[in-house]
Each structure stands twice: as structure tokens, then as C-alpha cells.
Image (spheres, rainbow, N blue to C red):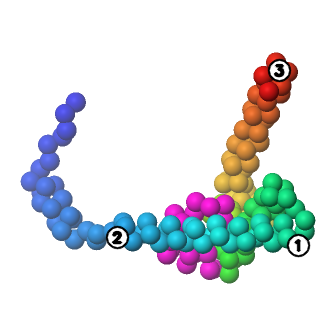
Amino acid sequence: MGKKQKTPQQKQYEQLEQKHETKRPVLLNCVKAFFVGGAICLIGQAVTYFYIYFFNFTEQTAGNPTVATMVFFSMLLTGFGIYDHIGQFAGAGSAVPVTGFGNAVISAAIEHRTEGLVLGVGGNIFKLAGSVIVFGVFSAFVIALIKTLLIKWGVI
């Protein structure tokens, strides 16, 4: 099917809309996202080195406590209202690292805390976290199954 023809009023409205539409600074937004996301990753690397230096973790074993620490930091910053300002400034630069997950989880809890601990906080935390956890567990199961079969068949 072809496109529906627009009436003269619709065309006039589109022209008016384009005239008054605010132009988004795409390049500036990309630069801000890049540097804030990089700063978050730099902090994460510093946390990793902290665990390696002070707690005798290896590079491989320091990953899990680093992720937990970064999620905890983002949850604290979200609770104090600071992470929202970071997100407003950086956009995807604050949402893409693992700290964005922590922010999303705790934001849902804060938003629905008036509904009670179980139905409000607990129920809304798992709206986001539940699907992430299920996907992670299922993915880990599939990878473990493939690895087990490859070992059994002598491929690896």
C-alpha cells in the first residue's frame, strides 16, 4: 500500500513543527556519554585494583566483587538523587555500564515504596531484575550444557 496523502493542514502543521523543533546536539551528547561512561569504567578499574592489591584477588576473581561494588555505588547515588543528575547529563553513558542496571533496579523500588515493602518495593524491583536474572541463569545453563557436551565429545 502507498503512503496516505496528507491534507494541506497536516502539511502546514509539519512545517510549523519542524520550524519550532529544538535541535539536539548529537555530537555533544555522544562526547558527554563517552567521557562519563569512560569515567565510570575507570572507577570500576580502580575498584578492581583495590580488590587485587588489598584482598589478594586475581584479575579473574576480582570481577565479581567489582561488579557488586559498582552496583552498590550506583544504588547509593540513586538513593541520594545524584545518579539522576549524572543520567540527565550523560544519557547512555550512565545507563550502559553495570551501574545503569543498579540505578534502574533501585529507581523502581524508590518509585513504588509507598505501596509497601512486598508489593511495592519487592514486586517492582523484580519487574526489571527478574527478567535479567532469568536471562542470565538461562544463558549460563545453555553455555554450561554446550561446554559439557563439547568436553564429553572430546572437542575441548
Main secondary structure found in the magenta portion: helix
Marks 1/2: CA–CA distance: 43 Å
Task: Classify the position of the C terminus by image quarter.
Answer: top right
Determine the residue located farthest toward the top in the rendered image. 153
Specify the label residue 79 is tagged with.
Answer: none
Three-letter amino acid code at the position of disc 3: Gly
Q: Measuring 73% from the left and 44% from the top, which residue is drawn there?
A: 136
What residue sits right under mark 2 in the picture?
25
**Nearer to the camera, 155 or 71:** 155
Q: Where does residue 149 sit, x and y in percent of width and height?
A: 81, 23
Label 1 or label 2, whichever lies nearer to me, is 1
Three-letter amino acid code at the position of disc 2: Pro
What element does badge 2 sit on? loop
Is residue 84 magenta-colored? yes
Q: Could you classify mark 2 by the number of other residues whose Cα lies within 10 Å: few (under 14), some (14-19), or many (20 or more)?
A: few
Mark nearer the N terminus (1 vs 2): 2
What residue sits right under mark 3 in the picture?
154
Q: Where does residue 94 sit, x and y in percent of width and height?
A: 57, 67
The span picked out in magenta is 81-99
Specify the label residue 54 is tagged with.
Answer: 1
Whether the residues at callouts 1 and 3 have beta carbons within 8 Å, the answer is no
Q: Where does residue 74 sit, x and y in percent of width and height?
A: 69, 71
